[in-house]
Amino acid sequence: MDRRYLTTPIYYASGEPHIGHAYTTILADALARFFRQEGHDVLFLTGTDEHGQKIQEEAARREVAPLELCDQMAERFKAAWHDLDICFDRFIRTTEAEHVRVVEAFLQRLLSRGHLYEGSYKGWYCVPDERYWTEKDLGPGQTCPDCGRPVREIEESNWFFRMSAFQDDLVRHIEANPDWIVPEVRRNEILGFLQKPLGDLSISRPKSRLQWGITLPFAQDHVAYVWVDALINYFTASGALPSDPAADDPGWEDTAASWWPADLHLIGKDILTTHAVYWPTLLMGVGLPLPRQILAHGWWVVGDTKMSKSLGNVVDPLQLREEFGTDALRWYLLREMPTGQDASYTPERFLTRYEELANVLGNLASRVLSMTMKYRGGVVPSAPGSGLDGAIGVTLDRVEEAVAAYRVHDALGAAMDLARDANGYVEEREPWAQAKDESRAEELDETLASLARVLVVLTALFQPVCPDRMGELASRLGLAGVPTLAEALEVDISGNEVAKGSPLFPRKDR
């Protein structure tokens, strides 16, 4: 069976889950569900990033131990993902003993291969982003160019990774694999970045400044830079453990039995450089295969401003869920943002997308089930039910093409278009008129069977984004669960007893 290993970033355990976290993780969840429908064996990874100065300082502010803070926040992320119906296969925490062993072996291997050296560094440091900046990079008033918050000038001894030695190899890899970074605009950004000489990467922090981290196995007075520690999580979660952690040049247990390399890293565009430059060069340094693809999505913005905890303009996804339901939130996030581009959140756009669910899909389900109850005693007629087969075939082709290109918004648009086609079929066939004429009984049976058949297909098409409501619709159609797409095309529901129930997506007043 074909396998797919896809990952989200692991989220800092210093703040609450927000809509940016939710979008990335729901997108990964929807892709994982599409892949499973296609028959793939899937490993879907998410988790929390639990080391670094930001964690240490936030724990001190709350007057708790760093691990206690991380324990609390990991549970909050897990609870949020449960509430948002996100079915991850592995939730990794970078404080896990297994991950610590892998990081130690990874760094030891870099050292033994001559890719690390000790040196000094002087520069400006942003604690929230855990990044150094040069003087020319800084924003107005000596602020971080990414988050706009003040930076600190620091001079200290660090261990460095000879990242510059792998610049040419990385450029060759990107040029030889045009789809390695998608969308194309992000690929071009990285190639532009790599036109300048690549510096070496500081991979440690002295314990005199930062205690909360993984100790370097060869330098007990330093901890690993949090970004290096965090990136290695993808390899840890693959199951490829060090074969001899105590060796000078530790190897790995049979990586063929693990899930490595990852098939898809899903990230926000703000962390593209770390994933498309730092991470692949580190992997080259230890002699491991690179991930097969990186998808960098856009930002959620309010007006013209990126959502940011520091600006106080983030939207709480759990509040939206409370009012509209989990599936409506998932639908909005994946339908509204074209994968790879920015999208603007407004309450009006949320309601517009919700009404699409209520007025098109929900209305179709209500009409079909009501007419089946009224005209055929709640039993799906035994008839060919082929009236919408042409529209179904076109839709499946569109969805398959869109999912293969990670254009989830287009896949969902195609699914909703099929629901619109089915509503149009109702108007065209006028089953209420067919029901008044006994000589048209076979026509009515064909109409109702065709509509029931399309509802079965729609449960499969919408399940990756609306798993709860599609499970409910499948139950009302007399099915034991939501079928895969292949099953939906083959299942015979003639004779099934249906139930109307309350609206799948109750209408909301504007």
Image (tube, rainbow, N blue to C red):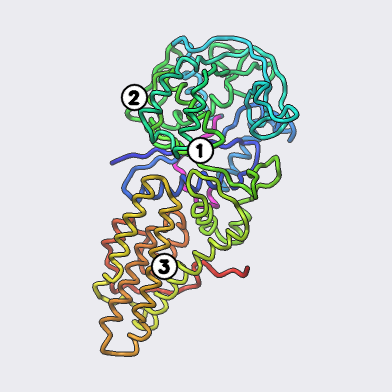
Q: Are circles 2 and 1 on residues that touch, CB within 8 Å? A: no
Instruction: Tell me residue 266's x, y (percent).
Output: 47, 39
Residue at coordinates 30% horizontally, 73% vertically from top-left? 449
Instruction: Tell me residue 132's x, y (percent).
Output: 63, 23
Give 241 or 121, whichever is nearer the viewer: 121
Q: Is residue 85 magenta?
A: yes
Residue at coordinates 71% horizontally, 29% vertically from top-left? 143
- The amino acid type of the residue labelled 1 equals Ile
**On the image, numbered disc 1 is attached to which residue?**
267
Rounded to the nearest whole Å, what is the CA distance between mark 3 and mark 1? 33 Å
**On the image, numbered disc 2 is attached to which residue?**
254
For marks 2 and 3 on the same chain, the one whose residue lies earlier in the sequence = 2
**Taking 70 as reference, is 464 left or right?**
left
**Taking 243 as reference, is 446 left or right?**
left
How many numbered dots are placed on residues in this image? 3
- The amino acid type of the residue labelled 2 equals Asp
Between disc 3 and disc 1, the foreground one is: 3
Which residue range is magenta in the image? 81-94
Q: Is mark 2 on a helix, strand or loop?
A: loop
